[in-house]
């Protein structure tokens, strides 16, 4: 008897689907872009947005809190007065932290999206998931104008997380409510 | 062959199911409100894009290309996933897929698994199969949880509990979670957060579906809103992803089209809160065992049909449900399948693959052919054309019926202008049935019309008679 | 030069609503068209095709092409039948002559929106699904109605929602069809209009049949009859 794989492939071939027309990519590859549009679109998701030039000065409100930070965030972000939590961290420790501070891989102005890829200043995925508050630092040069531009900047085989606002649900009467399982507060610092 | 669980055993035909659903005033009210809300929001989200039509065209073409090269692309996907440490399984039908997943759960000694909302696993009846095998699946998407705790069935692709309003959800949560909660959506969401938190932190096996799989990189993509997806895709040791074989895109670049089309079409957002992309296994981040189960379950049969196969382009956005005037009134459960609405009316009977099944054969008729579905479909599935195509199959399967005899007689009459004119004259005798220029009651099957509408009495003179007299 | 037009009355209008076809003739002649009515015409085959009797619709499609062959323009007072001819007939192996729904023909071919009509009534307009989505007539009918003297046009809420007719759908899924009809009637009644107009007698027969059952006091009148009405020769309800 043929294996499931062989049988499925044979059925596909038996269907004899004719070659398709070439794909026409007539849509926009880029867009207006820019800090202003990105900030506006992030804010539309009811995230907190600040445009700053000095990151450490914008972190004052973390003082007195227990905040997770990947080992490789810029050292000047690790201001005094905050209890910084670094890896290795258990799931329970992450769950009990007050928040997490990270950078990002890229961002998308059109859609107000931040993308994490587990690279520099981001850590593994669980870090930005379990704490209820996520503070993400986005440099101006990391903001791509459009979805196509952002995808070009990314390495697809890395573990990627696209974040557009705090966690939300539309499952009750199709009305959007912010705050379910993921961080209920998302704060974005755009560094110019 | 076992019956395909894509339709629910014992479901009545669509007209019968719809008849009782239409009497549920609460359901009517809930659906009117929800679909009305989302329709307006989707229109606004789409109006923002001046290249929407180009995106739709590209979406259609990419998916057609996938269907044309499906065998090659599936092999490429398998190779890419394996190269990154994942394992790929193939399943011909629901039964085979369920057995594969159950065996994988048993191999991990899992008694409980957490699940991300997935149409593919709902289609194959995975939860029931796991339960029978001693494994309890916990739905973690809010709407799926509402359906699961309410011992209910889904009624929408995106929001399976769309038929429930806030006070009904509150009642289900209080009864099943044993908590006091208000009917504010934010409080209900909080109750779900608390209820599921420990499950996320401790469960070792997760099961997901996939929105897209990128053939050339092996990357799997899941779009979601609540973060329950991220929990399941990130925290457990083992991840089992079940996906239909048509969920592919050829290359990473192709996602740029679908990541724009899908969120605006489904939740009417510029982007959904979370999209996760993973490729096989990443050391030190996320599940270290990854299994991908590829299911056919009627898809290759659908692929054989040159008209019907466009249903396989579907990206499960549910925009067609939200604009459908039939769906808005009957709700999703009337369709007797996890795939309701216009897409369900063309996909379900094809996956069942047997037009002798009266329930499946009734689905293509569950439409007034108004075309609103085609207008919003992000991958341009010409649903009305597929509906009429499948109706022709249903007619063929039924053979000789009172209807087919009447249709043949009508065709014979229309084939000749003189026969047609004679019939017109004979029909004008119906004037004698009329009172005040209208007929209020006809024998069956005309009674189906006159139960709620009058019929104008035929005029004393047809237009052609007038023309002949005055212009001929 | 006078434009030569063949009228495709459609079987429904020919049989049940002759006043609409007569109005088309009067209107087009007023706009300097010469109108012919090939007597060999019957039905476009839509009912058969849409119900799943594709094979029966094929000879009717062929017949249509034979009957109207040689005419530059065929005009039908129905978006649904014009849509069947234009969009479906080519898939049944025929190449039908150019066929237009009335409003399209007036605006696109004759280039007029003010047809010199007079109709002193409060009117609301239902854009029928096939004229809207198959043919894409857009707001051409509304432009025509806005130019009618004396006409008080009121917007129909949720106008683009189907009335629930759908051919045999109205019988096969009578309950669902009636539920759609009920909502459509509510929208019509909410406008306070005295006349409901549309470009398809099939939909008007459906909504009008429901309104009549309710004794709602709203009269269905085909777009052609409004556009044909003038001060000299005003529209009159046909007995």
Image (cartoon, coloured by chain):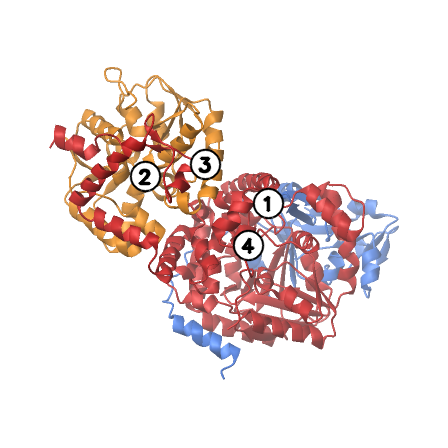
Cα separation, mark 1 vs mark 2, equals 47 Å
- The label shown at residue C79 is 2
Q: Chain of mark 1?
A: A
Cβ–Cβ under 8 Å for marks 4 and 2:
no
**Same chain for marks 3 and 4?**
no
Cα separation, mark 4 vs mark 2, equals 36 Å
Residue drawn 62% across and 40% down? Answer: B26
Q: Residue furthest bottom?
A: A1
Cα separation, mark 2 vs mark 3, equals 19 Å
- The label shown at residue C181 is 3
Task: Write down which chain is painted red.
Answer: B
A75 vs B453, left or right, is right
Q: Chain of mark 3?
A: C
- The label shown at residue B65 is none
Q: Secondary structure at mark 3?
A: helix
**Earlier sequence position, callout 2 versus callout 3:** 2
Task: Write down which chain is painted orange.
Answer: C
């Amino acid at each position: 008897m043929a294996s499931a794989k062989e049988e499925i492939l044979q059925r596909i071939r038996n269907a004899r689907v004719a070659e398709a027309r070439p794909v026409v990519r007539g849509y926009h590859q880029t867009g207006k872009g820019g800090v202003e549009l990105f900030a506006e679109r992030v804010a539309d998701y009811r995230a907190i947005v600040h445009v700053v030039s000095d990151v450490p000065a914008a972190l004052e409100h973390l003082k007195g809190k227990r905040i997770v930070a990947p080992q490789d965030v810029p050292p000047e972000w690790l201001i005094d007065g905050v209890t910084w939590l670094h890896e290795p961290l258990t799931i329970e420790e992450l769950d009990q932290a007050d928040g997490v501070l990270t950078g990002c891989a890229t961002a998308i102005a059109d859609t107000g999206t931040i993308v994490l890829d587990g690279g520099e200043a981001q850590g593994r995925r669980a870090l930005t998931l379990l704490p209820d508050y996520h503070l993400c630092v986005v440099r101006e040069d990391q903001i791509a104008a459009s979805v196509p531009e952002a995808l070009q900047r990314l390495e697809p085989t890395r573990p990627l997380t696209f974040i557009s606002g705090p966690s939300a649900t539309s499952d009750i009467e199709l009305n959007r409510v912010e705050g379910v399982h993921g961080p209920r507060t998302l704060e974005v610092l755009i560094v110019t | 062959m076992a019956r395909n669980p894509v339709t629910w055993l014992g479901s009545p035909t669509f007209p019968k199911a719809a008849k009782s659903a239409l009497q549920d005033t609460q359901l009517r009210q809930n659906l009117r409100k929800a679909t009305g809300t989302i329709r307006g929001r989707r229109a606004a989200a789409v109006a923002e894009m001046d290249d929407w039509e180009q995106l739709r065209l590209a979406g259609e073409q990419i998916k057609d290309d996938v269907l044309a090269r499906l065998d090659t692309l599936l092999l490429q996907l398998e190779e890419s996933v394996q190269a990154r440490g994942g394992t790929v399984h193939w399943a011909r039908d629901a039964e085979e897929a369920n057995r594969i997943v159950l065996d994988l759960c048993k191999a991990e000694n899992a008694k409980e698994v957490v699940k991300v909302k997935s149409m593919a696993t709902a289609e194959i009846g995975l939860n029931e199969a796991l339960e029978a095998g001693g494994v309890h699946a916990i739905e973690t998407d809010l709407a799926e949880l509402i359906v699961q705790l309410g011992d209910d069935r889904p009624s929408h692709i995106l929001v399976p509990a769309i038929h429930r309003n806030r006070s009904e959800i509150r009642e289900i949560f209080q009864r099943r979670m044993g908590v006091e909660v208000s009917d504010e959506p934010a409080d209900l969401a909080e109750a779900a957060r608390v209820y599921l938190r420990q499950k996320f932190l401790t469960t070792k096996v997760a099961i997901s579906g996939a929105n897209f799989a990128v053939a050339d990189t092996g990357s799997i993509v899941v779009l979601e809103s609540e973060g329950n997806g991220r929990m399941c895709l990130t925290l457990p040791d083992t991840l089992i992803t079940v996906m239909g074989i048509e969920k592919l895109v050829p290359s990473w670049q192709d996602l740029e089209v679908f990541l724009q089309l899908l969120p605006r079409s489904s939740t009417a957002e510029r982007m959904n809160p979370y999209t996760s992309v993973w490729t096989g296994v990443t050391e030190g981040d996320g599940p270290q065992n990854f299994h991908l189960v590829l299911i056919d379950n009627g898809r290759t049969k659908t692929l054989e049909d040159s008209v019907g196969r466009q249903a396989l382009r579907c990206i499960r956005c549910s925009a067609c449900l939200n604009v459908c005037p039939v769906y808005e009134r009957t709700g999703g459960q009337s369709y007797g399948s996890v795939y309701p609405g216009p897409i369900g009316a063309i996909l379900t009977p094809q996956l069942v693959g047997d037009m002798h099944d009266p329930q499946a054969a009734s689905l293509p008729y569950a439409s007034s052919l108004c075309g609103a579905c085609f207008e919003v479909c992000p991958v341009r599935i010409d649903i009305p054309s597929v509906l009429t195509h499948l109706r022709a199959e249903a007619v063929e399967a039924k053979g000789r019926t009172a209807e087919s005899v009447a249709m043949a007689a009508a065709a014979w009459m229309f084939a000749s202008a003189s026969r047609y004119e004679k019939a017109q004259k004979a029909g004008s005798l119906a004037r004698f049935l009329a009172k005040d220029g209208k007929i209020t009651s006809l024998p069956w099957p005309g009674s189906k019309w006159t139960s709620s509408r009058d019929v104008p009495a035929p005029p004393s003179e047809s237009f052609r008679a007038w023309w002949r007299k005055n212009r001929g | 030069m006078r434009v030569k037009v063949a009228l495709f009355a459609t079987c429904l209008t020919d049989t049940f609503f002759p006043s609409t076809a007569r109005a088309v003739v009067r209107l087009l002649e007023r706009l300097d068209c010469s109108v012919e009515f090939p007597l060999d015409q019957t039905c476009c085959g839509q009912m058969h095709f849409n119900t799943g009797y594709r094979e029966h619709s094929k000879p009717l499609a062929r017949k249509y092409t034979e009957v109207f062959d040689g005419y530059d323009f065929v005009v039908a007072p129905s978006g649904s039948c014009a849509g069947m001819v234009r969009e479906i007939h080519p898939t049944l192996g025929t190449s039908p002559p150019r066929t237009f729904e009335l409003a399209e023909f007036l605006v696109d071919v004759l280039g007029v929106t003010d047809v010199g009509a007079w109709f002193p009534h409060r009117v609301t307009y239902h854009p029928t699904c096939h004229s809207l989505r198959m043919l894409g007539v857009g707001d051409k009918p509304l432009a025509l109605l806005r130019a009618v003297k004396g006409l008080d046009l009121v917007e129909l809420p949720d106008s683009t929602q189907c009335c629930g007719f759908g051919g045999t759908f109205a019988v096969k899924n009578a309950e669902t069809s009636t539920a759609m009809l009920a909502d459509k009637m509510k929208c019509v009644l909410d406008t306070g209009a005295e006349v409901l107009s549309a470009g398809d007698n099939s939909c008007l027969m459906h909504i009008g049949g429901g309104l009549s059952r309710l004794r709602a006091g709203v009269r269905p009148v085909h777009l052609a009859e409004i556009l044909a009405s003038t001060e000299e020769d005003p529209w009159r309800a046909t007995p």
